[in-house]
Amino acid sequence: MISTTGTGYRTADGLAVLGPRVARVKFGLDSIFQRWAREIDGQEWDLPVLLAESQLAAFDYFDNFPHLAVAAIPTVRVEAVERERLFIASAACYGIYAALADSELDRPVVITVNGRCCRNEREYRGLRRLHHFTMRELVALGSAEHAIEHLVYFKPRILALAEHLGLRVRVETATDPFFDPNSSRAVMQRLLPVKEEVLTDDDVAIASLNSHRNFFGDRARIRHAGEAVHTSCVAFGLERWIHALDRRHDGDWAAVAAAVESFDGGAS
């Protein structure tokens, strides 16, 4: 149930509407992730939701994950027919790499974005699996060491937050969401794992830690110190956190909000 004065959320056909108390929790979680970015001098960027077909194609998006692609269909006009097709990406960080294409970084950086994303799925299940959802990502670009240190720094902080909120989680090596499980890159990843997921006790991935090596630096021609940058990202599915907290606290959104807003730390 959802109301303008109270609590709750509803989902239908992969779309979610959050009432005021649930939205407060979502924004509170996001503010924690923003604070983490500020603590390491991360830059907050605001990026377009839409990406051109050629931008995503440069990252092998349609080869590796064609079933997730969601096209934005404009009003059909004569002048629109010749335009390049636009897509809503399935992860927020694609926009960062597209925005930095053909650039030279003067120093290693961390960029954070809050992105509205879309994925085509065989089925949608409440807040666990949505067609349209929100991701907060913190992306490191620079040397290989910079990219790996980024993941090492944030892993214990994610676990500390989950513990503070009463969530039972575990960390497992997984297949990178950028690549289809049958692709050659996914096969290589099983030999050299570069992705970890933070899973709840009902097997929902609420966060992930991803190392892309120099893949995006090479494809987008982003360079630092004369070489293609290495990248890594820490990603949070905000609606999935809401699902986990609803399940843990049985819809007591006042208690959830209090727990979120009382969190003031990182790694214990």
Image: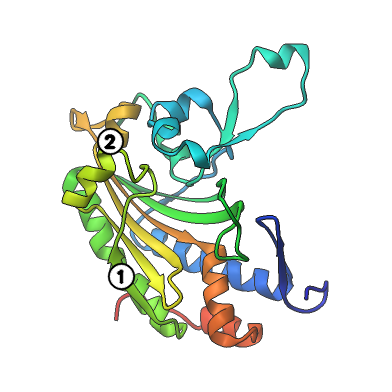
Identify residue for label 2: 215
| Viewer can see residue 84 | yes
260 up-or-down from 49: above or below: below
**Left or right placement of residue 63 versus residue 20 in this view:** left
Residue 141: horizontal and vertical position, in percent? 30, 43
| Nearer the observer, 45 or 16 | 16
Q: Are marks 2 and 1 in contact (CB under 8 Å)?
A: no
Task: Give the residue at the far right of this rendering.
Answer: 4
Return the residue at label 1: 171
Residue 106 seen from this side: no
Q: Quadrant of the N terminus?
A: bottom right
Residue 119 horizontal/vertical position (percent): 55, 47
Residue 258 got which mark?
none
Density class for disc 2 (Cα within 10 Å; few <14, some 14-19, many ≥20) is some
Does residue 21 appear to the left or right of 107 in the view shown?
right
Residue for point 37% across, 77% down = 169
The kind of residue tagged 1 is Val
